[in-house]
Amino acid sequence: VLAKNQDADLMSVVGTTVRLAQEHGVEMGNVFIDDTGVGAGVSDRLREQGHKVNAVKNGETARNTEQFINKRAENYWKLKKWLGIGNKLLSSDDWSELMSMKYKSDSSGKLKMMSKDEMRTLGIESPDVADALSMTFDRDSLLRAVSTDKEFEKMMLKKEKKKQGGNYQMKMT
């Protein structure tokens, strides 16, 4: 996450995205755009300019439909597993948003993240930075890397038996 931008001018967001990628040596193939709502206009314009960016729709069906209700849950799970095996994030106060991310299983046993509406009801601010980070895990190669280790999954699920906030469990611990 290189910058936070609440600019309503989508073309300005497009320009800022391209500039930041160039300044930091980030290939456009490593740029992830929230493709829901107004963000779709940003990814459309970037594609129109010839950039190959990753447009992520968190509400879409997960790649692993047996374990996750949607991409949002799947990407946060991949992020959690990535951190769980010892990977680290650069120090930032923004990562505290990860502590507010909670999930539970639906009636079919699929993992589901607490919705933003539920978070607002509980007085939890929108996790914009955490969501942006989780979208960077929307890659097939990462899914294969974290979905095949059944022993690791069992260990992580065992650790998460302690529940907090109703039926939701803490996502990032």
Image (cartoon, grey):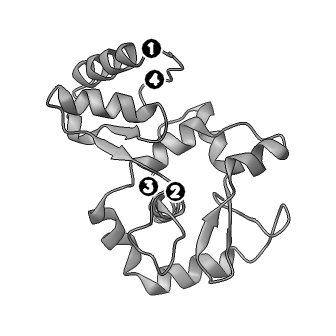
Three-letter code, disc 2: Arg
Residue labelled with disc 4: 3
Label 2 or label 3, whichever lies nearer to me, is 2
- How many residues crowd mark 1 within 10 Å: few (<14), some (14–19), many (20+)? few
Q: Is residue 14 visible?
A: yes
Q: Nearer the viewer, residue 40 or 27?
A: 40
Q: Amino acid at mark 3?
A: Asn
What separation in Å lies between label 3 and label 1 (alpha carbons)? 35 Å
Q: Which residue is mark 1?
A: 9
Q: Secondary structure at mark 4?
A: loop
Q: Amino acid at mark 1?
A: Asp
Decide: is 119 above or below 25. Answer: below
Place of residue 130 in the rendered image (x, y in percent of width and height, measured from the top left):
56, 43
Q: Can you tell which of label 1 and label 2 is closer to the viewer?
A: 1
Nearer the observer, disc 4 or disc 3?
Answer: 4
The secondary structure type at the circle numbered 3 is loop
Q: Closer to the observer: label 1 or label 4?
A: 1
Q: Are marks 1 and 4 in contact (CB under 8 Å)?
A: no
| Residue 67 in the image, given as x and y percentages of width and height | 51, 78
Q: Which residue: 50% across, 23% down? A: 4
Q: Residues within 10 Å of mark 4 (few under 14, many from 20)?
A: few
| Residue 60, position as x, y percentages in the image | 45, 59
Rounded to the nearest whole Å, what is the CA distance between mark 1 and mark 2?
A: 26 Å
The label nearer to you, 3 versus 1, is: 1
- Per the image, the residue denoted by label 2 is 72
Residue of label 3? 87
- Which of pointers 2 and 3 lies earlier in the amino acid sequence? 2
**Mark pair 1, 4: CA separation:** 16 Å
User: Does residue 107 appear to the left or right of 50 in the view shown?
Assistant: right
* Marks 4 & 3, CB-CB < 8 Å contact: no
Q: Secondary structure at mark 1?
A: loop
